[in-house]
Amino acid sequence: MGIQDPKPGAREAVLANIRGRRSVRRYLPREVPKEVILEVLDAARWAPSAVNRQPWRYVVVTRAELRQELCRRAGPGPLRWRHLAEAPVVIAVLADPAAGRWHLIDCAFAGQNLMLAAHALGLGSCWIGAFREAAVRGTLGVPDRLKVAGLVTLGYPAEPSPAPPRLPLEDLVSWERYRRGPRVARRLTRTGILSLARRRR
């Protein structure tokens, strides 16, 4: 069977969804229907995985007291991720190391699917990768045999999120042989903390 042309509008819709997704950290106090949560989780399970091992499991947290406990306990050091408490839904993405050496990468693919589906459904999301894993385990009852790959906050955005700057494609792509990337000054202004600070102006 040959390669078929995409359906009319499909290309534009997919690319617009990818470019429009944002990391959202402020949410409306509005409940996310269970069927919508299940829809984004269904998109996550269609992510690719090495040898189709599907190493992901999910814990969905909607109870306010549990989200507040995650906020109090999960942040690295003295930091607290306030959006863990404020988002109406937090999804813990769990990875099974028994599925092979690529389990964390596979779960990152699943997380991206989840967040793109959320954006397509009018939701905001944010992947949190910095947390105290032991605190998350204790709060959510995660067994030792599973890794906590990430936490995803989910809900309806409280405000628009402007796009952070991106390095131009010509700084990132080499053809045939590697060449050096962007100048340090351009990388400093378009990536990292400084780029996020500039976005808020």
Image (cartoon, helix red, strand yellow):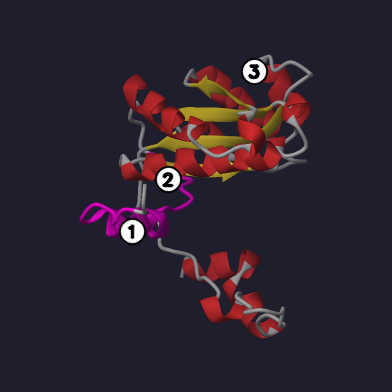
Residue 99, how many percent across, how many down?
A: 72, 27
Residue 1, how many percent across, how many down?
A: 37, 47
**Residue contact at pointers 2 and 1, CB within 8 angstroms:** no
**Foreground: 166 or 138?**
166
Q: Is residue 126 visible?
A: yes
**Foreground: 1 or 6?**
1
Snapshot quadrant of residue 127? top right
Q: Is residue 19 magenta?
A: yes
Query: What residue is shown with label 3?
Result: 140
In space, the residues marked 2 and 1 are separated at their CA atoms by: 11 Å
Q: Secondary structure at mark 1?
A: helix
**Foreground: 50 or 95?**
50
Q: Earlier in the sequence, mark 3 or mark 1?
A: 1
Snapshot quadrant of residue 58? top right
The tag on residue 116 is 2
Residue drawn at point x = 64 percent, y = 28 percent? 53
Q: Nearer the viewer, mark 3 or mark 2?
A: 2
Residue 171, how many percent across, how many down?
A: 60, 80
Q: Is residue 35 left or right of residue 170?
A: left
Q: Which residues are magenta?
A: 4-27
Query: What residue is shown with label 1?
Result: 16
Q: Looking at the image, is 19 positioned above or below residue 201? A: above
Residue furthest to the left: 8
Residue 86, how many percent across, how many down?
A: 47, 34
Q: Secondary structure at mark 2?
A: helix
Q: Earlier in the sequence, mark 3 or mark 2?
A: 2
Residue drawn at point x = 37 percent, y = 45 percent? 119
Amino acid type assigned to the residue bearing label 3 in the image: Leu
Residue drawn at point x = 64 percent, y = 78 percent? 174
Residue drawn at point x = 69 percent, y = 18 percent? 142
Q: Looking at the image, is 92 positioned above or below residue 106? A: above
